Amino acid sequence: MSESQKRIINFHIARLQDKSRDVRLKAIAELALLPDPEVLEALQGVFKTDGDLEVRKAAQEAGRNVFIKLKEQNAPGGSAGI
C-alpha cells in the first residue's frame, strides 16, 4: 500500500469519531471503497459501538463489501497484484 493510500485510510478512519452522523456516514461510504484489513477493523468497531442505528447498519454493509473485496484479492488469480 502506498503512503498516500495509508493517509487516505487514516483520514477516513479518524472521521468515524466525528460528532456528526452525516460525517460518519460519508467516511463509511469512502472506506467501503478501500479494501484493507485496517478498514475492516475500523468498520467493525463502528458497528459494535456507534450510538446511531443507521451508522451501525452502514458500517455493517460496508464491512461486508470490504471483506468480499479482500477475499477476492487474496484468492488465486485475484487482482492483488494490480
Image (tube, rainbow, N blue to C red):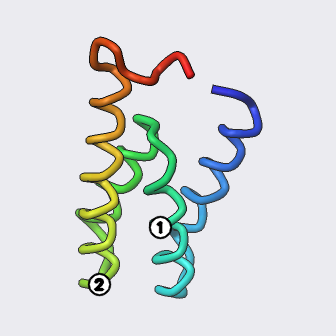
Q: Are marks 1 and 2 in contact (CB under 8 Å)?
A: no
SS for callout 2: helix
User: What is the crowding at mark 1: few (fewer than 14 residues within 10 Å), some, or many (at least 20)?
Assistant: some
> Which of the two residues, 68 or 79, is positioned nearer the viewer here?
79
Image quarter (top left, top right, bottom left or bottom right) of the C terminus: top right
Residue designated by label 1: 29
Q: x, y (%) of residue 3?
A: 75, 31
Identity of the residue drawn at 31% across and 85% down: 52
Q: x, y (%) of residue 10?
A: 63, 49
Identity of the residue drawn at 34% across and 78% down: 55
Q: x, y (%) of residue 50?
A: 32, 74
Residue 74, picture quadrant = top left
What's the amino acid at mark 1?
Answer: Ala
Residue designated by label 2: 54
**11 relative to 79, above or below:** below
What's the amino acid at mark 2?
Answer: Glu
